[in-house]
Amino acid sequence: MERSSSQEPPQRNHPVHLPPKFNHSRPIILFITVCTHQRQRLLDNSQAHGNLLQAWGLSSDWKIGRYVIMPDHVHFFCTPFASDPTPLKNWMAYWKSASARKWPTSLESKVWQRDFWDTQLRTTESYESKWAYVRQNPVRAGLVSLPDTWPYQGEIHSLAWHD
C-alpha cells in the first residue's frame, strides 16, 4: 500500500535550533557553522577576519572559543557568558548584521545565509575531536598544507570542560 502525501514525514528546510540544555556539572559548548549567502567566497582575507572578530566582541552574552574561517563559511565554538543570555538565534542575527554593516566591500550586499547549524557538544572528547576535524578544513580544501599555517583561525576565549 502506498503512502499518501499527507502521511509523508515533514521535510526539513531549515535547521532546528533547540535551546541549550543546562547541566550544572558541565559547561555548555555549542558548535556553529554559518555560510555566506550563496556560498560566496568572501571570508578568506584579513579585513573579513578582523570584521568578524569585532562583531563577535560586540556582545557580552556569548563567548567565542576556537574558530576557523573558510572562504565561504565559518565554524566556531561558543558558550553563553551571561546567566540569562540572549537566545542563540537572536545573538547570531545580531553579530551577522553587525558584521555585514561593516563589510569590506560594499558590493557584497548580502553576506550571510539567513540560517546556521548548531550542535551542543556533550563531552570533552567531542569538543577535541570536533576541533581536530574543523582545523583540518583548510588542508582538505587545498588552501594550505598544514593547519597551523591557515591565517584565519584562532581562539578568543578558552572554553574548557570541567571534569
Image (cartoon, grey):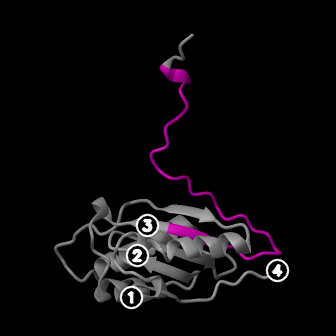
**Which residue is under mark 2?**
138
**Which of the two discs, 1 and 3, sits closer to the camera?**
1
Q: What's the magenta region?
A: 5-32
Q: CA distance from mark 4 to mark 1?
A: 32 Å
* Furthest residue toward top: 1
Whether residue 89 is visible to the viewer of this picture, yes or no, is: yes
Q: Residue at x 52, y 22 (%)?
A: 6
Whether residue 29 is visible to the viewer of this picture, yes or no, is: no
**Which residue is under mark 4?**
163
Indicate left or right for 64 with 129 as reference. left
Q: Amino acid at mark 4?
A: Asp
Number of numbered discs visible in the structure rendering: 4
The local secondary structure at tag 4 comes to loop
Q: Residue at x 50, y 80 (%)?
A: 67
Q: Position of residue 98 (x, y in %)?
A: 37, 79
* Furthest residue toward front: 145
Q: CA distance from mark 4 to mark 2?
A: 31 Å
Q: CA distance from mark 1 to mark 2?
A: 10 Å
Q: Amino acid at mark 1?
A: Pro
Q: Amino acid at mark 2?
A: Pro
Q: Is residue 7 magenta?
A: yes
Q: Amino acid at mark 3?
A: Val
Q: Earlier in the sequence, mark 1 or mark 3?
A: 3
Q: Residue at x 73, y 77 (%)?
A: 27
Q: Earlier in the sequence, mark 4 or mark 1?
A: 1
**Which residue is under mark 1?**
151
Q: Which mark is residue 34?
A: 3
Indicate left or right for 138 with 22 as reference. left
Q: Earlier in the sequence, mark 3 or mark 2?
A: 3
The local secondary structure at tag 3 comes to strand
